[in-house]
Amino acid sequence: MVPYLFLGFAAMLVATALMVVLHKNPVTSALFLVLAFCSLAGIYLLMHAEFLGMVQIIVYAGAIMVLFLFVIMYLNLKHDIETGVQTAVRRGLGWAMGGLLLLSAGALMARGWSLGPVNAELPAQGAGNAAAIGRVLYSRYLFPFEITSILLLVAMVGAIVIAKGRKSEGGEDE
Amino acid sequence: MIPLTWSLALSAVLFTIGVVGVLVRRNALVIFMSIELMLNAANLAFVSFAQQSKSLDGQIFVFFVMTVAAAEVAVGLAIIVNVFRLRETVFVDEINLLKG
């Protein structure tokens, strides 16, 4: 059952990610990206990362995509006009580079490689993924966690300052 | 349990789609979305290795990557809004003030 669900979610993920890249209208791209994040959350659930699946939906499909859609609609963009020889050349080069990257990834995975020893100190299943993550996050990773809060604060202040626009030389708003 | 190779292959495909999106599109917002796709491909690789090695450290890293992505999107979209105010465009090949 689980492998079929994984294949279904994977197919949906690849299809929606391709639509994000290929669709002309940015709003449609953003909505397909929401769908891609939801299918990735399903894959996380299948991999016993229940907490991350929930956070994926809340943070990505909720917060980040709302921000994206807000900015797209705020800027009132037209469809992309993509014609001309230069665009065609660039697009061909882009797809060629992508194919090359995928080939090199396949070559890397086809080589013989193995994982390190299995670390069985933290059972992910059983008592609940969120509780286990909380236990690790607030003990071993407490300092990075606190640094993260400072990062978010700085990003918030920076975004407000940048988006507010600059003042003219006299000190009044433009 | 899902084989590690499957999820790594899916991660590679997702990353490649993100790279192609950055290279092919000229709308700065769509380029940003492609960067999000690449970050999610890295997250998927982290989660699959965490599942394989029965450790939670990979999942903690995904948590941090998500936080950094949220901060990056906030600042990046503010920059794009500002660029649109100055240049009236979000197409990256028309924002060429530094080009000689």
Image (spheres, grey):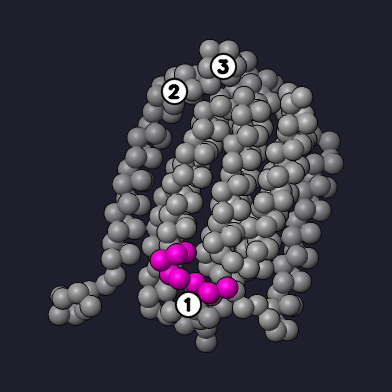
Residue at the (29%, 54%) spot, across then down: A157
Q: Which residue is mark 1?
A: B89
Q: Marks 2 and 1, Cα distance to the nearest angstrom? A: 44 Å
Q: Tell me the quarter of the image containing the N terminus of chain B.
A: top right
Label ID, residue A134 = 2
Q: Marks 1 and 3, Cα distance to the nearest angstrom? A: 50 Å
Q: Marks 2 and 3, Cα distance to the nearest angstrom? A: 12 Å
Q: Is residue B75 left or right of residue A35?
A: left
Q: Which residue is mark 3?
A: A122
Depth-wise, is mark 2 or mark 1 nearer the camera?
Answer: 1
Q: Are marks 2 and 3 in contact (CB under 8 Å)?
A: no
Number of numbered discs visible in the structure rendering: 3
| In-front residue for pair A77/A91 | A77
**Rendered location of residue A143, percent (x, y):** 37, 32
- The answer for which chain carries disc 1 is B
Q: Residue A63: say if magenta.
A: no
**Rendered location of residue A57, percent (x, y):** 52, 39
